[in-house]
Image (cartoon, grey):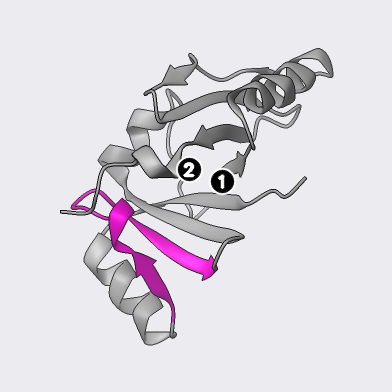
Amino acid sequence: MSTMIFVNLPVRDLETSVSFWTALGYSFNPQFTDENATCLVIDEGHIYAMLLVHDFFSTFTDRQIADTSTTVETLIALSADTREGVDELADKALAHGGSPAGATQDYGYMYGRSFLDPDGHQWEVTWMDMSQVPPAP
């Protein structure tokens, strides 16, 4: 089984973040980029970071965004090969000490569930039908 990782990071100023990472030689996927977020490509096909403005980041959790001057926190997303794979991993997490972290999200082309690990870190398990993702503007 192949798993990709998407690290979701809140940012105060998206333009500043894009400029910084571009200067370091990284690229972005325009299909997942708008005024609220951008997809930083770390390792094509394997590792990405979603850079999300604070207000948009807040729509994915009921918890307060960590103050990075005193704490560290991320939302870590893992891909699944199928919708059933999403449920399998989330159910295993809940059965082994995890707790629910929100409602199931079903957008047709994208399906996901969330859980908190025993330390309270939020993990997002997501399946996407990339052929159905809306095109970039």
Give x and y (percent) for residue 103: 48, 13
Please report whichever mark, 1 or 2, sits nearer to the chain's N-terminal start: 2
Task: Give the residue displayed 35% in from the left and 34% down from the top.
Answer: 58
Q: Which is more toward the observer, 67 or 29?
A: 29
Q: Which residue is mark 1?
A: 73
Magenta residues, start to end: 26-43
- Hey, what amino acid is under mark 1? Glu
Q: Residue furthest left?
A: 137
Above or below 28: residue 64: above
Task: Give the residue displayed 54% in from the left and 52% down from the top.
Answer: 7
Decide if residue 37 is on the left or right side of residue 120. left
- The residues tagged by marks 1 and 2 sit, at their Cα atoms, a distance apart of 6 Å
How dense is the environment of label 2, judged by Cα within 10 Å: few (below 14), some, or many (20 and up)? Answer: few
Above or below 39: residue 65: above
Decide if residue 116 is on the left or right side of residue 101. right
Give x and y (percent) for residue 34: 21, 53
Q: Which is more toward the observer, 89 or 19?
A: 89
Above or below 19: residue 42: above
Q: Which residue is mark 2?
A: 66
**Quadrant into which the N terminus falls:** top right
Task: Give the residue displayed 40% in from the left and 30% down from the top.
Answer: 109
Task: Give the residue displayed 76% in from the left and 27% down from the top.
Answer: 118
